[in-house]
């Protein structure tokens, strides 16, 4: 971008500040062909001119009575309205310490007198090009931010239609951003089966939230047609393989409980193990044995099912890896063991799932979570 701008004629307003009129005349002679030149013979006058109309660049002498150039620069950089103005010191002070002081105050350049017209012209051209490029980038970033906000609002509204029948459920969802990458869906098929999906798209935020509405639609549509869990799970993978960009995938576990709530089937693709708790102890862990969804078409995906008999009062837990991967100051993860200890303790003492957030925050010394935190409890 800068190369393109340097090849184009640059225009702009330059404020030259010097208490010697002859020096101002030299600046005008060198630069007035391409730029509008304003002049000020004192620091006070310069600040007043800048307040009424900001220039694009300032050429500033140092040795001036009452208020020297250093003080003018300091005031400009302390004021948010003028802090971004490029200041070039144009001075007879040649000592290295003088130049260091000027640059430390925020000047972008330091040119010593007597003025070399070609050097002054090129330095001014370069710093104006940098300023214009910076403004262009800022405008583009603001536009991208507006577009991102619009897309986020659309996705949030689409996600508000997520299928989440909360019968037999308790859950905890704490996203890093409003457009979470974690997905929790639950519904009942017409034949009475309960289907619960816990999933985690790669990363978090907008890129990872885009697939959520697709997953929601597939589950709602196929469950309403009484299709079995293996068919639904395979369709998830098929559609995500076709639609997700390279590098994006979906770790997910689908739990299917029969209408009489006596039998469980679990399909787990790269999510932490689903946990079955009975009588206060962990009875079974349903580990993943297939790749995340959306990586490759897996012909045997529907057959990778694990089954278990259920009893009244059993509890099932599924969670995203963001829970286990919370780290303390030493870089040690919270881990599965601590999470399972919380689950058993919460059951024994009838604690709320949201208490986990307090425990995690304490563990990481109140640092912000780096990934979405999601946990669901299903009561049989």
Image (spheres, rainbow, N blue to C red):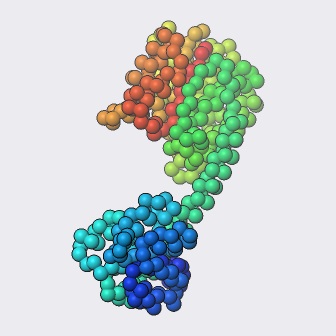
Residue 266 falls in image quadrant: top right
Q: Residue at x 73, y 28 (%)?
A: 226
Farthest front residue?
Answer: 66
Q: Residue at x 43, y 59 (%)?
A: 78
Which sits in the foreground, 373 or 55?
A: 55
On the rendered structure, is 204 left or right of 73? right
Q: Residue at x 56, y 26 (%)?
A: 172
Q: Position of residue 94 (x, y in %)?
A: 25, 78
Q: Position of residue 143 (x, y in %)?
A: 61, 60
Which sits in the foreground, 90 or 133?
A: 90
The quadrant the C terminus occupies is top right
Would you place residue 173 above or below residue 309 in this image? below
Residue 101 falls in image quadrant: bottom left
Which sits in the foreground, 318 or 133?
A: 133
Which sits in the foreground, 163 or 150?
A: 150
Q: Position of residue 112 (x, y in %)?
A: 31, 81
Q: Position of residue 203 (x, y in %)?
A: 50, 44
Q: Residue at x 51, y 15 (%)?
A: 351
């Amino acid at each position: 971008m800068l190369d393109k701008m340097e090849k184009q004629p640059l225009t702009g307003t330059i404020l030259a500040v010097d208490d010697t009129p002859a020096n101002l005349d030299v600046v005008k002679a060198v630069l007035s062909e391409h730029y509008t030149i304003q002049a000020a013979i004192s620091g006070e006058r310069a600040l007043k001119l800048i307040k009424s109309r900001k220039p694009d660049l300032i050429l500033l002498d140092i040795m001036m009575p009452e208020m020297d150039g250093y003080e003018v620069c300091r005031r400009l950089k302390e004021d948010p309205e003028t802090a971004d103005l490029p200041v070039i010191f144009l001075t007879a002070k040649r000592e290295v310490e003088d130049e260091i002081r000027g640059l430390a105050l925020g000047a972008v350049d330091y040119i010593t007198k007597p003025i070399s017209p070609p050097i002054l012209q090129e330095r001014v051209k370069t710093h104006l090009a940098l300023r214009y490029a910076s403004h262009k980038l800022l405008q583009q970033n603001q536009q991208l931010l507006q577009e991102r906000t619009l897309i986020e609002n659309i996705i949030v509204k689409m996600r508000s239609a997520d299928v989440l029948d909360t019968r037999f459920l308790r859950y905890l969802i704490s996203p890093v951003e409003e457009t979470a990458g974690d997905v929790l869906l639950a519904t009942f098929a017409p034949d009475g089966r309960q289907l619960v999906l816990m999933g985690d798209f790669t990363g978090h935020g907008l890129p990872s939230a885009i697939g959520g509405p697709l997953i929601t639609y597939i589950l709602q549509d196929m469950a309403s047609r009484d299709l079995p869990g293996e068919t639904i799970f395979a369709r998830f993978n098929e559609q995500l393989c076709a639609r997700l960009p390279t590098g994006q995938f979906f770790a997910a576990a689908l739990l299917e409980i029969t209408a009489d709530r006596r039998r469980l089937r679990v399909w787990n693709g790269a999510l932490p193990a689903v946990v079955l708790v009975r009588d206060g102890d962990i009875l079974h862990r349903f580990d993943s044995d297939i790749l995340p969804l959306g990586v490759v078409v897996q012909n045997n995906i529907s057959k990778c099912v694990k089954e278990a008999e259920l009893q009244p009062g059993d509890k099932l837990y599924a969670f995203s890896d963001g829970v286990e991967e919370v780290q303390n100051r030493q870089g040690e993860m919270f881990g599965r063991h601590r999470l399972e200890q919380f689950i058993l303790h919460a059951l024994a003492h009838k604690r709320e799932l949201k208490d986990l957030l307090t425990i995690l925050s304490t563990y990481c010394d109140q640092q912000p979570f780096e990934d979405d935190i999601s946990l669901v409890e299903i009561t049989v």
